[in-house]
Image (cartoon, rainbow, N blue to C red):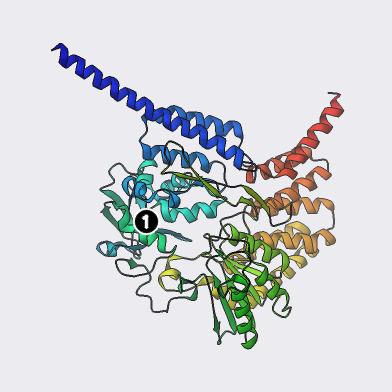
């Protein structure tokens, strides 16, 4: 009896010892991870306070004992996401494949966030009846609550990066469980809605990692193929150009009926130099411009909405555009971006926006114009199967005072589920309708100018509200419209300085996410001695972008003046 008791005691001690060792190993890795990022990253706490980050790190440090290995990794990912840097992250796709296969399970359906909600865009054949349905609820949570929690688990620069990674996170069973949406990964209840607004319930079991990994890695917009059913497979329209040739990094096609030369760049993973290499970016650009010059094309459309980055090799493209001034015009040169557009592709977009007269159409990209990047990987010492990526450079591709967290397109075209199902490309439709959209905008601008002349700000507001829905329906960038009216008309034609403040306050109420409008309002308020309102707006700028150094400087200078006046 004593021997049995001794054996049990020794087994318990060994289990506790092993648990302590495992906990210590994870805690050491967590310390190493933070130290490594602080060494590598130019400014890791640019967007999130260091003291708050350390509080969250300490919280995870204490929770490790009660977490599974998978939950620890997901918690690390969640911790890194607070830094708001899409290049500093748990590198899911670069971690050890064998470990991923053993640790994670995927759903047999693929979900995507359209303008009008989350839909099942593809799935394994046995779930074909769910493909095309709108997702209303997963497990015990509404889809909005699920996406809100998942968005905090993956590093991103802005909300479009958050949407981008829902493509993955909505399909990883362990993430849904960590979010609290599901308990049993083998039977996840979905509440969906069909075209007739009828509610449909379905139970879906997670499948092995390899059953779906290939489809997720293949493309951001999977099409019907061997083993997969896609939402648009029965569309009467042919597959739009942007969904064709998914395996090509660089390809182009002339559209004679529209006189458009369409160029899609799906990757910038081209080596620097090697100008004589047949597959170099410079050679490919040369071939593109030769084809353009031979054609009767009157417009160029550059599509980078599926481009996640690569290298900064854009000069041959930029030079080719600048060498053809007849095409470097807003109504002839177009760039299409999307939520997948990231890293070097954002650099390309910013360079083209800065140095050409290009019109940007589509969704905002998932990276900032000025951003941290050039991610480098490292493995955790005690868990080398896990890779972490960290930014090592800062790219000031735009102006130093550009504190925007995304490049807003000139014309916003967010795709609806019906458009995707029917193989309709709203971005290309906007290119074709550009002249009509611009005429609408010019007409509205003249109406507002006349309304201000006749009845100042109240008259301008009344006219604006009567025309607002037409403007929004066109997709024209509301922030750009409001800003242009201020810069091109009101700043010169104002009847009083108070009109500038009243207009900017109105513009901010219409577009509260505009960092530039908020800052302009703050400056005007400060210049008129309305310091309380100025402080409020400067602080709002910092809420939108904690790295807004100008707003921070202004607040500190105001505090300094107040201290001098008070004699402190």
* Residue plotted at (71% across, 69% down): 356
Q: Quadrant location of the C terminus? A: top right
Camera-side residue of 474 and 147: 147
Image coordinates of residue 544 in percent, x first then y, are: 63, 46
Camera-side residue of 490 and 566: 566
The answer to whether residue 93 is left or right of residue 38 is left
Examine the image and state in which quarter residue 281 appears. Answer: bottom right
Q: Residues within 10 Å of mark 1 (few under 14, many from 20)?
A: many
Do we see residue 134 in this rendering? no
* Residue plotted at (54% across, 29% down): 55
Q: Is residue 299 above or below residue 315?
A: below
Camera-side residue of 131 and 251: 251
* Residue plotted at (18% across, 14% down): 5
Query: Residue beneath label 1, please?
Result: 135
Image coordinates of residue 21 in percent, x first then y, are: 38, 27
Q: Is residue 521 above or below residue 471?
A: above
Q: How many marks?
A: 1
Do we see residue 237 in this rendering? yes
Q: Quadrant location of the N terminus? A: top left
């Amino acid at each position: 009896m004593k021997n049995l008791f001794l054996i049990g005691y020794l087994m318990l001690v060994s289990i506790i010892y092993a648990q302590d060792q495992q906990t210590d190993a994870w805690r050491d890795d967590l310390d190493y991870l933070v130290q490594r990022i602080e060494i590598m990253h130019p400014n890791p706490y640019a967007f999130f306070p260091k003291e708050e980050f350390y509080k969250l790190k300490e919280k995870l440090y204490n929770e490790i004992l009660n977490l599974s290995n998978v939950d620890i990794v997901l918690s690390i990912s969640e911790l890194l996401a607070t830094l708001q840097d899409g290049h500093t992250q748990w590198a899911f796709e670069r971690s050890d494949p064998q470990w991923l296969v053993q640790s994670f399970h995927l759903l047999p359906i693929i979900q995507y966030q359209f303008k009008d909600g989350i839909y099942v865009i593809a799935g394994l054949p046995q779930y074909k009846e769910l493909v095309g349905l709108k997702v209303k609820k997963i497990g015990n949570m509404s889809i909005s609550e699920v996406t809100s929690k998942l968005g905090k688990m993956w590093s991103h620069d802005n909300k479009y990066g958050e949407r981008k990674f829902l493509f993955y996170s909505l399909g990883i069973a362990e993430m849904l469980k960590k979010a609290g949406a599901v308990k049993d990964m083998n039977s996840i209840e979905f509440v969906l809605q069909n075209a007739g607004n009828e509610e449909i319930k379905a139970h879906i079991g997670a499948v092995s990692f390899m059953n779906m990994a290939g489809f997720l890695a293949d493309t951001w917009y999977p099409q019907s193929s061997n083993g997969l059913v896609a939402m648009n497979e029965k569309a009467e329209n042919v597959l739009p150009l942007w969904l064709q040739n998914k395996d090509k990094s660089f390809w182009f096609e002339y559209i004679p009926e529209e006189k458009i030369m369409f160029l899609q760049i799906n990757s910038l993973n081209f080596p620097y130099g090697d100008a004589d290499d047949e597959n170099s970016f410079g050679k490919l650009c040369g071939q593109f411009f030769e084809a353009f010059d031979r054609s009767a094309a009157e417009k160029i459309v550059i599509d980078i909405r599926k481009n996640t980055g690569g290298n900064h090799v854009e000069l041959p493209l930029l030079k080719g555009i600048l060498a053809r001034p007849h095409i470097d015009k807003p109504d002839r040169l177009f760039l299409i971006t999307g939520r997948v557009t990231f890293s070097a592709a954002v650099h390309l977009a910013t360079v083209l926006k800065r140095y050409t007269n290009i019109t940007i159409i589509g969704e905002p990209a998932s990276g900032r114009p000025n951003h941290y990047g050039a991610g480098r990987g490292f493995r955790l010492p005690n868990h080398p199967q896990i890779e972490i990526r960290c930014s090592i450079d800062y790219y000031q591709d735009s102006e130093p005072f550009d504190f925007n967290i995304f490049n807003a397109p000139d014309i916003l075209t967010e795709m609806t589920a019906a458009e995707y199902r029917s193989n309709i490309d709203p971005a290309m439709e906007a290119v074709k309708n550009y002249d009509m959209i611009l005429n609408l905008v010019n007409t509205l601008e003249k109406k507002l100018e006349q309304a201000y002349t006749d009845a100042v700000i109240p008259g301008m507001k009344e006219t604006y509200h009567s025309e607002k829905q037409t403007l929004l329906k066109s997709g024209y960038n509301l922030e750009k419209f409001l800003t242009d009216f201020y810069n091109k008309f009101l700043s010169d034609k104002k009847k009083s300085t108070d009109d500038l403040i009243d207009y900017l306050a109105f513009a901010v109420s219409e577009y509260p996410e505009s960092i530039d409008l908020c800052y302009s309002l703050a400056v005007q308020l400060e210049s008129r001695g309305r310091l309380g309102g100025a402080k409020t707006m400067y602080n709002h700028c910092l809420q939108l972008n904690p790295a807004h150094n100008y707003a921070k400087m202004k607040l500190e200078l105001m505090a300094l003046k107040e201290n001098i006046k008070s004699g402190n």
